[in-house]
C-alpha cells in the first residue's frame, strides 16, 4: 500500500486545512436524497474541528460546463450542517478573493464549504496554476475523497504536491480495507464478481485471478464464461464475442491456482419482468428461448460452501437481476450468509460498487459487512491493480517544514 500520513500525525490547531471531500451526492428539488457520503465525511470533519482547525472543504458536484447554478454545492451545505450538527459557511467560489475573504472570517473549529471546483475547467485539466491558487488558501491538505482518487485533477492530485498532505479518516479506512483484502489478506480469499458484462471488467478479472483463491462468477457475465466452455445459455444475456477473453481469463486463473466457480443451474424465464413465471433448470436443460436471470439453488449452495471455507471476501456485482423478483433470491441469500459469517467473526467482507451496495441494502446487510466502499471507479481501478493518482500524490506531498504558516493563523 502506498505510504501516506494520516490525521494521527497532524497538529491542526489554528491551521487552515483544505479538505478534499466527495460531496457529489444525489440532489432532487434542491434537497439531498442520499446523505451516505456526507455521513462518512463527518468523522474527519469532527476530528479536525476538535483539534481547532479552520476547515475549508473542496469538492466537485456533477459535470458542469463552466459556472452553472444547477451544479452549485449550495444545496449540499444544508445537508452537511444537519449531519455535522454545526453551522457551515459557504463561499461561491473556490479560489480568488471570494474564497480568501470567506476564509478570513473563520475561527478555530469552524467549517467553510467552497463552491464546486469544476466551475473552473482548469480543475479537470489538472492545471498546476489552478492547483496553486487553491493551495495558496491554506496551510495543509487533507484528502478524504477516495471515490475521486482515480482522477488526476487539480484538487485531488496536483494540490497534494504543493502542501503537506494527509489522508482523512475515510480515505485511510478505504485504503486499509482494500490493502487487507488484496495486498496482505488472510487466506483463503474469495471474490464474488457479478454484473451484466465481462467487457467492462476485463482488467478487474485478470488482476483478481492472480491474487485470490476462488473467483465466483454470477450475473450475465457468468453466461459468457459458460458459453466459452460450450454451454448453451439460450436467450440469456451473453457477450459471445468475448468468449476468447473469457477463456484467457480461465487460463490465467489456472496458472495462478485460482479456482473459478461458475453456476451449474439457473432461474429461467421466457420474459424479463417482475414476477414472471420462472423455473429452476440445470445448465444442460436450458432451452433456446430461456433467459437465465439468476443463478439456481445448487449454485447458491456451492457459493455458501466456498464462503464457509474463506477468510476474506471481495464482492463486486450482483448474482442475478436482483431488482426484479423472483430473480433476487441468490443475491439476497448470499448477502445474508456473508452477513452471518462476518458477524460471527469468521469472514472479513469488503464490498463496493453501486449495484452491490443497492443489493446489500435490499437484503438489509450493508451494516453487517466489514467494509462497504462508496467509491465506484476508484474501487474498481484499485481492484484492477491500477495506481490511483490521488493516492499516489499523498506519498509525494511536501514535508510539513516546507510550507510556511499561513499569515492569517498568526
Image (tube, helix red, strand yellow):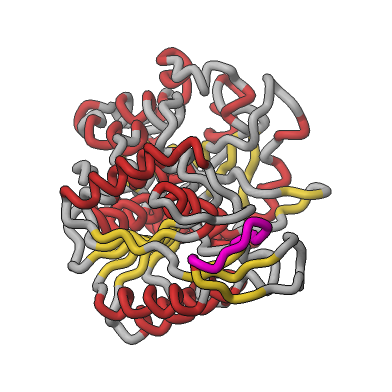
At x 49% / y 66%, what residue is drawn? 284
363 in relation to 210, above or below: below
Q: Residue furthest top?
A: 129
Total numbered badges shown on the rendered structure: 0
Pick whichever, 78 or 97, lies toward us: 78
Residue 203 placement, left or right of 107: left
Quadrant of the frame with the C terminus: top left
Q: Position of residue 293 (x, y in %)?
A: 61, 63
Q: Indicate whether 371 appears above or below 211.
A: below
Q: Is residue 330 left or right of residue 216?
A: right
Residue 268 covered by magenta stretch: no
Residue that appears at 33% across and 86% down:
344
Res. 264 image quadrant: bottom left
Give x and y (percent) for residue 151.
Answer: 44, 31
In the image, taking residue 379 as reference, residue 403 lies left or right, namely: left
The answer to whether residue 340 is visible is: yes
> Where's residue 222, x and y in %?
46, 55
Instruction: Name the foreground residue: 308 vs 79.
Output: 308
What residue is at 44 percent from the left and 19 percent from the top?
A: 126
Q: 39 or 385, which is in the foreground?
A: 385
Q: Nearer the viewer, residue 386 or 32?
A: 386
Residue 74 picture location, percent across and down: 70, 41
Which stretch is magenta? 284-292
Amino acid at each position: 500500500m502506498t505510504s501516506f500520513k494520516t490525521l494521527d500525525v497532524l497538529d491542526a490547531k489554528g491551521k487552515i486545512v483544505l479538505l478534499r471531500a466527495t460531496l457529489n451526492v444525489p440532489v432532487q428539488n434542491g434537497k439531498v436524497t442520499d446523505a451516505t457520503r456526507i455521513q462518512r465525511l463527518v468523522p474527519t470533519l469532527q476530528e479536525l474541528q476538535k483539534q481547532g482547525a479552520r476547515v475549508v472543504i473542496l469538492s466537485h458536484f456533477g459535470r458542469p460546463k463552466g459556472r452553472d447554478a444547477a451544479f452549485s454545492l449550495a444545496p449540499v451545505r444544508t445537508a452537511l450542517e444537519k449531519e455535522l450538527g454545526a453551522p457551515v459557511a459557504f463561499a461561491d467560489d473556490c479560489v480568488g478573493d471570494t474564497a480568501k475573504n470567506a476564509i478570513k472570517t473563520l475561527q478555530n473549529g469552524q467549517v467553510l464549504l467552497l463552491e464546486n471546483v469544476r466551475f473552473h475547467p482548469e480543475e479537470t485539466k489538472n492545471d498546476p496554476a489552478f492547483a496553486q491558487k487553491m493551495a495558496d488558501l491554506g496551510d495543509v491538505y487533507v484528502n478524504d475523497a477516495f471515490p475521486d482518487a482515480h482522477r488526476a485533477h487539480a484538487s485531488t492530485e496536483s494540490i497534494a504536491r504543493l502542501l503537506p498532505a494527509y489522508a482523512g479518516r475515510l480515505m485511510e479506512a478505504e485504503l486499509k480495507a482494500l490493502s487487507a483484502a488484496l495486498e496482505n489478506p488472510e487466506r483463503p480469499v474469495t471474490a464474488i464478481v457479478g454484473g451484466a458484462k465481462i467487457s467492462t471488467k476485463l482488467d478487474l478479472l485478470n488482476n483478481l485471478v492472480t491474487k485470490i483463491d476462488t473467483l465466483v462468477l454470477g450475473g450475465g457475465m457468468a453466461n459468457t464464461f459458460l458459453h466459452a466452455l460450450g454451454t448453451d445459455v439460450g436467450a440469456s444475456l451473453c457477450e459471445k464475442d468475448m468468449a476468447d477473453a473469457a477463456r484467457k481469463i480461465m487460463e490465467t486463473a489456472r496458472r495462478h491456482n485460482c479456482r473459478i466457480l461458475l453456476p451449474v443451474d439457473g432461474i429461467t424465464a421466457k420474459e424479463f419482468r417482475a414476477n414472471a413465471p420462472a423455473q429452476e433448470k440445470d445448465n444442460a436443460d436450458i432451452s433456446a428461448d430461456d433467459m437465465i436471470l439468476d443463478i439456481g439453488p445448487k449454485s447458491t449452495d456451492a457459493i455458501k460452501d466456498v464462503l464457509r471455507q474463506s477468510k476474506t471476501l471481495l464482492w463486486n456485482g450482483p448474482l442475478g437481476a436482483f431488482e426484479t423478483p423472483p430473480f433476487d433470491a441468490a443475491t439476497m441469500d448470499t448477502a445474508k450468509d456473508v452477513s452471518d459469517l462476518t458477524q460471527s467473526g469468521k469472514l472479513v467482507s469488503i464490498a463496493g460498487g453501486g449495484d452491490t451496495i443497492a443489493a446489500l441494502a435490499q437484503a438489509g446487510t450493508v451494516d453487517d459487512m466489514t467494509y462497504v466502499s462508496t467509491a465506484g471507479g476508484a474501487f474498481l481501478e484499485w481492484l484492477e491493480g491500477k495506481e490511483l493518482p490521488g493516492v499516489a500524490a499523498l506519498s509525494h506531498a511536501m514535508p510539513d517544514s516546507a510550507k510556511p504558516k499561513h499569515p492569517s493563523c498568526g
